[in-house]
Amino acid sequence: MNRFFIHLIMLSTMALSPAHAERQSYAVMHGDTLKLGNSLVERTFLWNGGALKTVRLVNKQHKTAILAKGTMPDFAMVKAEVDSAWIKTEWLSANGVHPAYLRVSVWSRQGTLECLRQFRVYDDCPAIACDYYLKGRINPLHQSTVVNHADRKNIESTADMGIQLKTPTIDRIQLDGNHWQTRVVEFLDYTDWNDNLVVERQFIPYRRTGHRGNLLFSKDELTGKGFFFLKEAPSSSTQLHYTGSDFITDFNDFMVVSPGFTHQDISPDTWTRIYGCVIGVWNDREVDALIALRSYQKQLRSATSQRDEMIMLNTWGDRSQDAKINEAFCLAELDRAKRLGITVFQLDDGWQTGKSPNSKTSGGSFNDIWKDNLYWTPNKSKFPHGLEPIVKKGKKLGIRIGLWFNPSIQHDFADWQKDADVIIKLHQQYGIECFKIDGLQIPNKTAETNLRKLFDRVSTETNHQVIFNLDATAGRRGGYHLFNEYGNIFLENRYTDWGNYYPYRTLRNLWQLSRYVPAEKLQVEFLNKWRHAEKYPANDSFAPAHYDFDYLFAITMAAQPLAWMEAANLPQEAFALATLMSQYKTIQHAFHQGIILPIGEEPSGRAWTGFQSMASETTGYFIVYREDNQRPQAELSTYLTKGATIGLELIAGRGSSFNAHTDDEGRLLFKLPQKNQFAIYKYTIIK
């Protein structure tokens, strides 16, 4: 017999404390029906003894509902039934990183396995997230998620037509209808090896088929009702124990699979967190889907201007590696950084006593870091006074100091406590708030768990003042959809030394990612265009030397700009960039607070392209780029409503302020007099 305990806060009753009286999020149980929701979305389950089955997904903004069949449990690891279950709710207060939200915990036991689902419901967000934890014992999982259709018999075979595989599912929704227009988006990181970071596939689900990707959008073509799944996990190519698919579709049955663990990862004594999932609602238009997704993503980290906004200078981009870094060099770079308008100066590899394998000289290693307790102390020969003179001068100039850090990968980050101690001490001693986290390898669940412990402890003990730049350039790391609450993503290494820095390709990567990943969470580079012009073919019009330095900075503005260079190597004319940086800083935080989406054509070196930041229903910003083309004007697709009158105020770049009207498709006419130019506008919808 099932045991069922329920501890539930009902928002419609006096049980809600006065401090929470204005909260919209709720969890309500009526008989065998559980409803989770807020002002924009509601997900209704059959309790089913704790093996929840979705029966309805409501889009409150559009007053529509997607009905689900609820024939199978949404979450199932070993079997469909549960032996016992309970539910409780609690409010988690805002902590400086995440906003307040309602957490609804559903615990269940399936044989020797305990399962804990923790739903996160945020106010004014059209999506509901869920984190999953397992404890106990579990037999090896069934790893085959799909059967190759070529190995099946024809449709006259009743046995093959009815095949059902026991696939562990993180989440699931089983719908009516046969016209679900679906798109799955796959992401690639380890950007030292990839320069095409987004792969999309459109289809209408038919028979059981697996798909790769972190995102699935689907819309009923008959009604316009849509939903999305976001799998909170690394990119498909770097997930743990990957079974070949992230989603399985079978006509109108949508499953989120590959939970990222093996039976050996599950302990009888401690909870193991597996990959999470988010479900959200949208209606008819693609922009509604993108706004719904972004509305959720912005809940993960409440960005502040002081902590999260940055124009960073990191000297590693000029390939001196650790050869130049010392007190005198850094003090001189700070003076140059001030002239440019830099807000964060980051000391990369070489500030520490220990020598890494990336050192200019041989003999460096990351092996057994903690055999030397001085490894992460400032190198005395380079910094005889510690980091104090650097930090002191930075404060005087209004520039924060950041550091590079490589956690000890030995034994799956077993020394995470020692790593955390170092970062916390550097924060307490010097006030360092920004750490670039490099060299990560996450080969198994233990490593992932220990890494999360490291980030959590540092965040908690520094009162959430530390922000991490999570390097995505190599190895098995978090990708674009894991660890998002801890900071931003160092996107890519590109170097003029190797002739692989092309401004339009950097812009293309940002433009493509920004549709699905918050642009403000990406750190994007611009380089010294005067270095190594000889590394590029003389007839290559896309080589960096052919662009104004202002333009190179401008392609990073939708993200967090990274000056990937030694300021000492810049010619005098480069410091004129300070004017644009000053203009940019007046709108940087406001631009990033909006919902940033790509507009115009995909960057190709010949396009008209850009970004739109939607700050409110009537205001926002545009950054528009005219690449190397012969068109002095172009109509760009935007997310403005059709037939609107728009006032555009020039903030920076070429062009001038003007008023314009959107056409029947929401397009807007922009003009730039010459190729490879840009303009930043603040817009207001007049009527």
Image (tube, rainbow, N blue to C red):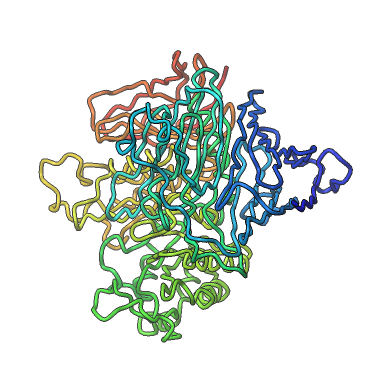
Total marks shown come to 0
User: Residue 161: image x %, image y %?
Assistant: 42, 32
Task: From this view, report whether residue 453 is shown above or below residue 672.
Answer: below
User: Residue 76: image x %, image y %?
Assistant: 57, 48
The answer to which of 665 and 649 lies nearer the viewer is: 665
Would residue 647 be seen by someone viewing this image from the given angle?
no
- Name the residue: 72% across, 38% down: 35
Task: From this view, report whether residue 250 is shown above or below residue 570.
Answer: above
Dividing the picture into quarters, in which one does residue 227 lie? top right
In the displayed image of the protein, which residue is found farthest to the left?
A: 538
In the displayed image of the protein, which residue is found farthest to the right?
A: 14
> Image quadrant for the C terminus?
top right
Dividing the picture into quarters, in which one does residue 554 lie? top left
Horizontal side of 142 relative to 68 (left or right) equals left
- Name the residue: 12% across, 52% down: 534
Task: From this view, report whether residue 508 is shown above or below residue 88.
Answer: above
Horizontal side of 304 relative to 359 (left or right) equals right
The answer to which of 510 and 101 lies nearer the viewer is: 101
The answer to which of 404 and 679 lies nearer the viewer is: 404
Horizontal side of 348 relative to 62 (left or right) equals left
Would residue 54 be seen by someone viewing this image from the given angle?
yes
User: Residue 359: image x %, image y %?
Assistant: 28, 74
The answer to which of 350 and 572 lies nearer the viewer is: 350
User: Residue 8: image x %, image y %?
Assistant: 79, 48
Horizontal side of 313 relative to 419 (left or right) equals left
